[in-house]
Amino acid sequence: MRLLGSIRKLDLHIFVYCGTTRNFLHPKFTSQLHLPIDSKDILQISVASGLELTQGTIQEVPMSLQGYSFMTSFHLLSVQGYDAMLGVQWLESLGVIGWNFKERFMEFHIGYKQNCLKGFNPSKAQIIQYAIMAKLIGEGGACFMAQLLLLHTFTFVTTPLLPKLQELLAQFSALYDPSYQLPPHNKKILLILSVEPINVRLYWYPHFHKAEKEKLITKMFTTGVIRRSSSPFSSPMLLVKKVDGVWHYCIDYCTLNAFTIKDHFPIPIIYELLNELHGSVIFTKLDLRSGYYQIRMRDDDIPKTMFCTRNGHFEFLVMPLGLTNAPSTFTHFFL
């Protein structure tokens, strides 16, 4: 709790804090108050920023808090944000204390007299005019100013690639070719016998998704990932925002997956893969570009991947995300 107090008629901002065992006073006030300092009494204090040493102590300091006067001692320490701090060293001398943190006051009895100390209420920042600000500063009001400054400017300098690295990039330049070629047929979707074509109605989506959907569909259609479809199958399309803020398509194949015969090809256990790395020092990571698109759908199963949008019906020529057997197919293909 914050209080307004005084030492020898010098007004101070006091912080009453039961989380510290000692009393502390900022060393800058010792010269103004003409208080004798015992520089031999040094105390090591543990604070949030690390360990600090006090600069001595002052004994029998006369202090007044809103009409309540008493004598106490202080350790000299640069207290941030306050002029002085009263801890358990002072609080335990008061006996039974009544606190009201909502109204910010504390009550205690010294002899037959009841004392009540009122704390500051948190003030809200308000915009004031320049004339009022100048008047407050002229009257000795406390002022805190903050300004944002550009300390450093960064210039990014691109250094030329090493000749060996240039040769390596040239050797695998086809990997960075934006054009797309369909891989061989591999993926199949086996449905339970006598199942009618799965057809799920189009989902509603907000208007701001419209442009993103059209952009994704145009990109997939241009690269040959999807094509127009007249299949009796149909699954709805959704948009999901990734962690980096980029929108990604998601086809809801839940109904189709419910009638798909499951492929129980074992997926690697992460703990076994980590055990394989035991004793290694250098690690490399391979990340496939559009990994699922490296697996092409069989012609008979392409119509089952059909998804519906307001711009028409489309079907995948490669394995899309969302199929129940897609992870096992991907694992089987690359092991």
Image (tube, rainbow, N blue to C red):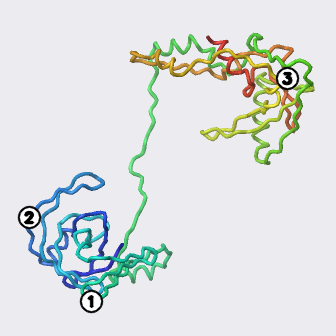
Label 1: which secondary element: loop
Please name the amino acid that badge 2 sits on.
Answer: Ser
Sequence-wise, which precedes: disc 3 or disc 2? 2
Please name the amino acid that badge 1 sits on.
Answer: Tyr
Callout 2 crowding tier (Cα within 10 Å): few <14, some 14–19, many ≥20: few
Left or right placement of residue 275 versus residue 78 in this view: right
Label 2: which secondary element: loop
Left or right placement of residue 121 versus residue 27 in this view: right
Sequence-wise, which precedes: disc 3 or disc 1? 1
Q: Which mark is residue 180?
A: none
Alpha-carbon distance for marks 1 and 2?
38 Å
Label 3: which secondary element: helix
Task: Return the residue at label 3.
Answer: 304
**Closer to the camera, 128 or 334?**
334
**Closer to the camera, 316 or 192?**
192
Task: Return the residue at label 1.
Answer: 112
Foreground: disc 3 or disc 1: 1
Question: Residue 242: x, y in percent?
Answer: 64, 38
Q: Is residue 270 above or below residue 183?
A: below
Left or right placement of residue 129 versus residue 317 in this view: left
Question: Residue 192: x, y in percent?
Answer: 85, 19
Please name the amino acid that badge 3 sits on.
Answer: Lys
Callout 1 crowding tier (Cα within 10 Å): few <14, some 14–19, many ≥20: few
Task: Return the residue at label 2.
Answer: 39
